[in-house]
Image (spheres, grey):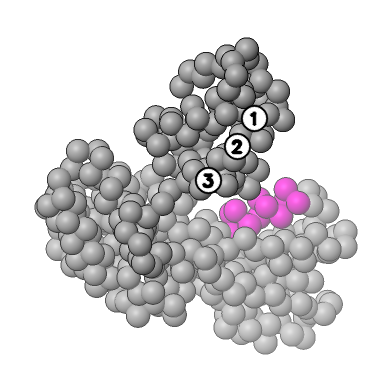
Amino acid sequence: MQFCIQPDSEIPVSTQLFDQLSFAITSRRYAAGAQLPSIRQLAQRTGLHRNTISKVYQQLKQAGLVESRGGSGVYVKSLPSTIGQNPLQQSVQGMIEQLLSQGFSLAQVKEAFVQEIDWRSQCAAELLVVSGQEDAGVAQIMARELQQALPVQMQIATIEELPQLLQFSRARTVVTNRYFGEQTQRAISAVVSAHNPVRLFLLDIYDYQAEINRIQQLPFGTYIGLVSPSTGILRVAENIVHSLRGEDLVVMSALPQDTYRLQAITRSAHLIIIGHGGLEEVKRAIAVTKHQRLRPLEILTCKNYISPASIKRLRVELGLD
């Protein structure tokens, strides 16, 4: 948009700029939601003082043509074309208008909306919770937490099994964490089609801030035991502990079924962190080694693997909320 200002005109320069901007907005040269130039940019383009431009922008706001957004700039204000709609109706109307402006017909938009709603209903029938075969334990952890939060049937599988399972399973939503996202997407892409689509949902994991804070507080030389059904979680946890404390701490990890290593940990550790499974096995190991213990033992259990916000998003995605 080019702005032409005549400083010698009888018409005040602020009026000239206001008229040109209001014309640009009402003629859709600046569409609804478009950002206007900043005061500094407009001053450079017109040669007007910044105070004059600020005054014009204030007039545009009073006229209901623009709005300011939290320090990010001035934007063309969007007004509903139908009065009395609730916020949901306004959002739907905005999406429909956007699709129509892209060249889709109203019939196509209606069909797409109906198909998407039906599709989401089907997605909630059953979930396939997957991880790589090198770390099948993490899929069990995810499925256990999801079963507590969602009234949906679930099946646990490895990514390598996906192509075959998707041909026969009624599940239309595959769930995994972001670490396995790319690998899972490739496996799905190998078998899906436009007539047999599959939705992939990537979970965010819990931030473990409480556990990290506890590790940072430990005195030099503390012996930590890490227990989890997932080899991947154990590997990452060991690396993070090392990154936080270097060689300050002694760390040993074990799977719940590794009785020998569990007993070695319960015999000597100051702190055992149990991640998402293995508490009963640790208790049994403590009972066996209680007469050999050298020091008091602290047990810290991780309550979550999946971020609560991620589970909430999944509920919305499946139409459960």
- CA gap between label 1 and label 2 equals 6 Å
Could you say which disc has been placed on residue 147 in the image?
none
Which circle's residue, 3 or 2, is located before the other in the chain?
2
Choose between 288 and 54: the one closer to the eye. 54
Give coordinates of residue 286: x percent, y percent: 68, 82
257 magenta-colored? no
- CA–CA distance in space, label 1 to label 3: 15 Å
Callout 3: helix, strand or loop?
loop
Q: Which residue is mark 3?
A: 63
> Are the residues flagged by discs 1 and 2 in contact, CB closer than 8 Å?
yes
Q: Nearer the viewer, mark 3 or mark 2?
A: 3
Type of the residue with mark 3: Ala
Q: Amino acid at mark 1?
A: Ile
Q: Amino acid at mark 2?
A: Tyr
The answer to whether one can see residue 133 in this image is no
**In the rendered view of the protein, which quadrant contains the C terminus?**
bottom left
Q: Label 2: how many residues lie within 10 Å, few (<14), some (14-19) or many (20+)?
A: many
Residue ID at (36%, 46%): 183
Mark 1 or mark 3, earlier in chain = 1
Q: Where is mark 1, residue-wise?
A: 53
Mark 3–mark 2 Cα distance, whole angstroms, equals: 10 Å
Q: Is residue 135 above or below residue 121?
A: above
Position of 270 with respect to 58 (left or right) is: right
Q: Residue under label 2, please give it.
A: 57
Q: Is residue 237 magenta?
A: yes
Residue at x-position 59% and y-position 15%:
9
Instruction: Say which residue appears at 66% left-offset and 50% top-offset.
Output: 239
Taking 300 as reference, is 10 left or right? left
Q: Nearer the viewer, residue 260 or 147?
A: 147
Which picture quadrant has residue 182? top left
